[in-house]
Amino acid sequence: MPGARLFQRDRLVQIALARAPAMADDNQELTALRSNADNLGKCLHALLERIETLEGKSREVTQNDTSVVNHENDHDDRNHRKEEQVEISDTVSTDPVTGVKKRTIVTERVLTTKTFHALSLDPTPSMAPISNGRILSPGYQARAVHIDAKQLNQIEVEKISGQLVVTRVNASANHDIHPGDTITHVNGKAAVDHSSITGLTGRITLTLVPTAIHGAPSVFYRVNADYNSDLDDSRICRWLSIDVKKGDVVQIMSQDDNWIQARKVNDLSRVGYLPASLSKEKVAMLCPFGRRVLVLLGAVGVGRRTLKSMLLHAAPQYFATVVPLTSRQARPGEQEGREYHFVTKGEMLRKIRDGEMVEWGELDGQLYGTSADSVRAVVRSGRMCVLDCAPQALSYLYNSEFMPFVVHIVPPQLEEFLQLENLRHHRRPVDQLSKVCAESDQIANGPHANQIHLTLMNRNLDVTFKRLTDALELLRSDTQWVPESWMS
C-alpha cells in the first residue's frame, strides 16, 4: 500500500507538470495582480495613517503620553494583523535526474479589503443605543395581527413622520393592538395614509411594529408617584398593564380628562392607562450632544451631503433631518412627506412673509425651502437636526432657540484636489474643481465666518466622517462656550 500511494503521488505530479505550460501565463498574471493589490493596499493604508498624523494626531502626543502612544500602536498593530491573512502551501517534488525529493514551503501574506478602511468609524457611546434605564432602541420585531375590520373603529390612528401610529385604544379593542404601534402594512400592502385603513370589510391582517420614540407624539411626563394598574380596581382596561415608579418618564400617546394612555420610555413594551390625576411633571427630551442643530456648510461638490447621509444612517436614533417644502406638483413616484411636503405657492409665500422659513429659493418658477417648524419638530423628538444649508440660513438659526453647531466642509488646495480627483473613476473638470475651491473661500471669508465652529478638510470621506463624529462626541464631554445671548 505505501508503494501504491507513492505511485499515485508521482502520477499526480506528472499530471500537474503536463498542465503547467498551459497554466503558466495565467499563474504569472495572477501573481502579478496579487502583488499589485498587496502594494496598493499597503499604500492606501499608509496614506490614510499619514493624513491622520499630519492633520492633528501628532499634535496631541506629548512626552508624558509615551506609554499611551505605545499602547495605541500595539493596539493598531494587532488590528492590522487581524486584517491580514497568512496562507502557507507545502509541496513535495522529486528531481527527475537525481531522484532527490525536495520540500517547498511558500508563505504568502494576503491583504484583505478591510485594510482600505483602516480609519473606519468605531462604535462610540454617542453612536450606540442607550440602555440601563435610559432611552432604548425599540425591538423592531414586526408581528401580524388578524382582526375583523370593524375593530379599526376601536382605535385612533395619527399620521406622524409619514407613519400611521396608533395613539388610542379602547378597552373593547383587539388585545393585540397597543398604543404606540405603527401600522406598516394592511393585507400585505404598505400603509401610506388613512385611506389604507378605511372602507375595509371582513377579516384583515395588520403588520405592526413598535414605534420609535421620535416617531410617536413628543409629549413626555416624569411621574412623581408610584402606580400599578394591576392594583387599581377602577381601571377601565384590564388587559393593558403598566407599572411606573416615581421618577419614571412616560411618553403620552393620548389623554382625556380621566385617563392617559402612555408607555414607559425605558421599556417601550410597557403600555397602559394612567389616571390623569397622577402627580406628574411635563418634561422635554434633549439631544445628548448639547446642541439642537448641526449645520453643514460647504460648496456644492465638496461632499457635505454625503457626510450628512452617512451620519443619518450611522445613528438615526440621534440624528434626523427635515423634509423640505415645495410649491410644485408631485411627480410620479413621489410621496407626500417623503421627498417633499407639497403646498401651494400662496402658502409658501405666506410662510416667507411671516418669517417661518429658515431658507428658501426659486427654481423654474417653483419655490423650495425649509420651514422652521420642521426643524422644531426634529428637536422636540430629542434628536439633533442635521441641515446642509447655505450660510445665509445662519441668520435665522444662530440663536438660543436652535443653538447650532456649525461645521464648514472644505476641499484641499487645488493642486492636491486635482491629484485626488485623478484617483476617481469619474473625474470632474479642472474648472469645476476651481469653482468648488473658490466657493469654499467665499464661505470661509464671508459675513458668517465668525459663526463657524469647526472646519474639516475633506480629502477622504471616511477620515472626514470619523473626525466629524469625534467632534460631536466631544460636545458631550467638553466644556462648551456659546454666545452669552444664548443663555439669557
Image (tube, helix red, strand yellow):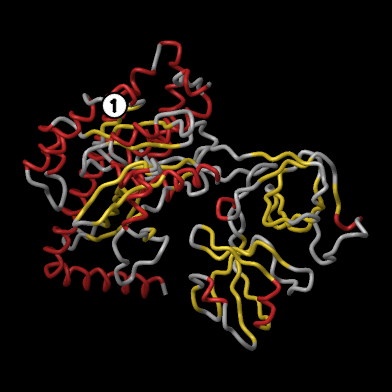
Q: Quadrant of residue 115?
A: top left
Label 1 CA crowd tier, 10 Å (few <14, some 14–19, many 20+): some
> At which x and y percent is residue 146?
66, 80
Q: On the rendered structure, is 458 left or right of 125?
A: left
Q: Quadrant of residue 272?
A: bottom right
Report which residue position mark 1 lands on.
448
> At which x and y percent is residue 122?
45, 40
Q: Nearer the viewer, residue 435 or 111?
A: 435
User: How many marks can you see?
Assistant: 1
User: In the figure, 405 relative to 33: above or below?
Assistant: above
User: In the figure, 1 relative to 223: above or below?
Assistant: below
Quarter placement of the N terminus: bottom left
Q: On the rendered structure, is 158 left or right of 55?
A: right
Q: Nearer the viewer, residue 193 or 364?
A: 364
Q: Examine the rendering and report whether any part of residue 107 can be seen.
A: no
Amino acid type, label 1: His
